[in-house]
Image (tube, grey):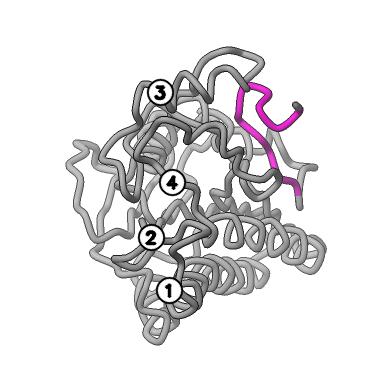
Amino acid sequence: MLLKNKKVIIIGGSGLIGKQIIKTFLSNGAIVLNLDLKKILIKNSRYNFKNFNCSDLNSMNNNFDQIIKKFGVPDIFINSSYPRTQDWSKNDFRNIKLKSLQQNVDIFMNSYAWSAKYFANKMSKNSKKSSIILIGSIYGRVAQNLFNYEGTKMRENYSYSIIKGGIDGATRQLASFFGKYNVRVNNLCPGALNSHVAGLAKKQSRRFISNFIKLTPMKRLGKASEVANVALFLGSDLSSYITGQSIYVDGGYTII
């Protein structure tokens, strides 16, 4: 088992990617605490859940302090959350409002940047190896190709690109500072997956899938399990000399 008795805290573990990461980590011997607003049922004695609102930045430090008192400092911290405002679906280039942009950057990017810094700081005071994994996106590297949205009700999202690009930068800065303390920080960036879509569309349209596949060298969408397997690699000692990197699990989308 790659993660036997390793303590893992994940924010946003009830979503598509987070849930699969939890299952993969548990099957490799980890002890997992899922911080989320939505409770999911996983029958495993090494799985724990705590109701947690990652949008509440003002209470974040105090909440983390209380969690660590009970759970301890984790060996691995993962942020797979997706905090956003109710008008998130209107964050396309034409309709986005300044207030919405400000709010989404604040609760999304800042919650990632601050939570990672908080746990890196705690981990740095231990003598053991630690790993932080932030769930980024291909859109932290490449622009959203508007061709993908042609003929669909889905929209590009300006806030999303800004936020994911910011997470990419935060990853490198954190890795640079905390490397000497044996704390590794990496940015795991999925491409399009077979999943629902946060925003205007309830699910991906067949047209979007077709458009996206045309631009993907492997000619298919990804699976959450494929992302979780890379998270397992980044969390384990198999990646012991990898830090500050953005790892793309995208079927080659970003190389075109």
Find the distance from the CA under tag 1 to the CA under tag 3. Answer: 28 Å
For badge 1, the amino acid type reads Ser
Q: Circle 4 sits on which residue? A: 155
Place residue 36 in its image quadrant: bottom left
Among the two numbered marks 2 and 1 on one chain, the one whose residue lies closer to the N terminus = 2
Q: Position of residue 154 (x, y in %)?
A: 39, 41
Q: Circle 3 sits on which residue? A: 207
Q: Position of residue 243 (x, y in %)?
A: 76, 49
Among the two numbered marks 1 and 4 on one chain, the one whose residue lies closer to the N terminus = 1
Find the distance from the CA under tag 4 to the CA under tag 2. Answer: 8 Å
Find the distance from the CA under tag 2 to the CA under tag 1. Answer: 9 Å
Task: Depth check: give the residue in front, 202 or 173.
Answer: 202
Q: Decide whether residue 219 is among the magenta residues.
A: no
Q: Circle 2 sits on which residue? A: 90
Q: Residue at x 59, y 55 (%)?
A: 161
For badge 3, the amino acid type reads Arg
Among the two numbered marks 1 and 3 on one chain, the one whose residue lies closer to the N terminus = 1
Q: Is residue 189 left or right of residue 182?
A: left
How many dots with numbers? 4
Is the Cβ of the residue at disc 4 closer than 8 Å to that at disc 2? no
Is the Cβ of the residue at disc 2 closer than 8 Å to that at disc 1? yes
Q: Circle 1 sits on which residue? A: 100
- Above/below status of 32 relative to 214: below
Find the distance from the CA under tag 1 to the CA under tag 4. Answer: 16 Å
For badge 2, the amino acid type reads Lys
Other residues around mark 4 within 10 Å, as few (<14) / some (14–19) / many (≥20): some
Magenta-drawn segment: 245-255
- Above/below status of 187 relative to 251: below
Query: What SS does tag 3 mark?
Result: helix
Q: Residue at x 53, y 59 (%)?
A: 93
Q: Comparing marks 1 and 4, which lies closer to the viewer?
A: 4
Query: What SS does tag 2 mark?
Result: helix
